[in-house]
Image (tube, helix red, strand yellow):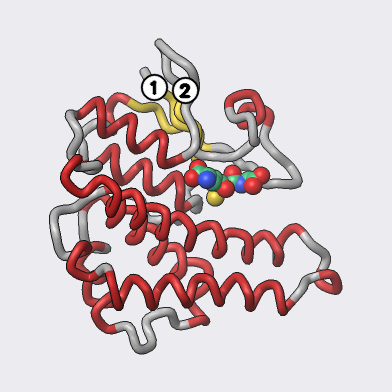
Amino acid sequence: MFKLLYAPASPYARKVRVVLDELGQADEVELVHVATSPTAPAAEVAAAHALKKIPALIRPDGCTLYDSRVITRYLDARAGTQFYPESHLWETLTLEATGDGIMDAAVLMVYEGRCRPEDKQDKGWLDAQWGKIDNALDALQERWMSHLAGPLDAGAISVGCALAYLDFRHGERSWRMGRDLLDDWFAVFAERPSMQATRPV
Ligand SMILES: N[C@@H](CCC(=O)N[C@@H](CS)C(=O)NCC(=O)O)C(=O)O
């Protein structure tokens, strides 16, 4: 049995759980809920992941895997390569990096609010992180809609989980404004059973 170290609010872990669900592999993985943060890493996370992060996939027959895109690619390879199609591999990986990058900036913004005292928080830095997200959202709407409209792949899953995280943690920033096409795509994606089953509580 595999073990996945995860937290329900982690968008990276959600990506892995969505892939597990979509590939029909969820029953093969025990979900181990951990409470961890950059300033208070859980011992089991530090033991499994060299950088003390989640998700980490502990395998009974091999080394522990991280980060999320390594895990999703491994799970996909086990299933026969559906979400990293050879015919669109570089586009898929670039789109996945875009979704993951939105998560990176959005998670750093949360940590700035949570891990630093209020008087040390840097509004300019927070706005700069949001500036990256804003730019990436524009790129998605301008250049990636036809890819997103195609068969589901790891890039689309990453973008969908990133947008869901923006709703979850940064709803007041209104990412949908002026981005109807992306909003329409996400509305359909968010209804997938894999997304419904992995909603953060
Ligand atoms: N690139 C990593 C990022 C993972 C990550 O940053 N996870 C967060 C939780 S959402 C974490 O564990 N943070 C703890 C830390 O930064 O020390 C991945 O895709 O797995």
Q: 10 Å neighbourhood of mark 1: few (<14), some, or many (≥20)?
A: some
Which residue position is annotated with label 1? 2
Q: Position of residue 45 (x, y in %)?
A: 61, 31
Quarter-of-image position of residue 162: bottom left
Q: Residues within 10 Å of mark 2 (few under 14, many from 20)?
A: many
The correct choice, above or below, for 38 with respect to 176 in the image is: above
- The quarter in which the N terminus is drawn is top left
State the residue at coordinates (40%, 59%).
Answer: 99
Q: Position of residue 139 (x, y in %)?
A: 37, 73
Is 89 placed above or below 62 here? below
104 vs 84, left or right, is right
User: On the image, numbered disc 2 is attached to which residue?
Assistant: 58
Q: Amino acid at mark 1?
A: Phe
Mark 2 C-beta closer than 8 Å to ligand 1: no
The residue that appears at 14% across and 54% down in the rendered structure is 151
Residue 87 or residue 57, whichever sits in front: 87
> Which residue occupies 57% across, 37% down?
34
Give the alpha-carbon distance from disc 1 to disc 2, as whole Å.
6 Å
- Callout 1 touching callout 2 (CB < 8 Å): yes
- In this view of the protein, which residue sits in the foreground, 25 or 107? 107
| Residue type highlighted by circle 2 | Ile
Residue 3, position as x, y percentages in the image:
44, 25
Q: Secondary structure at mark 1?
A: strand
Percent across and percent down for residue 28 are 30, 24
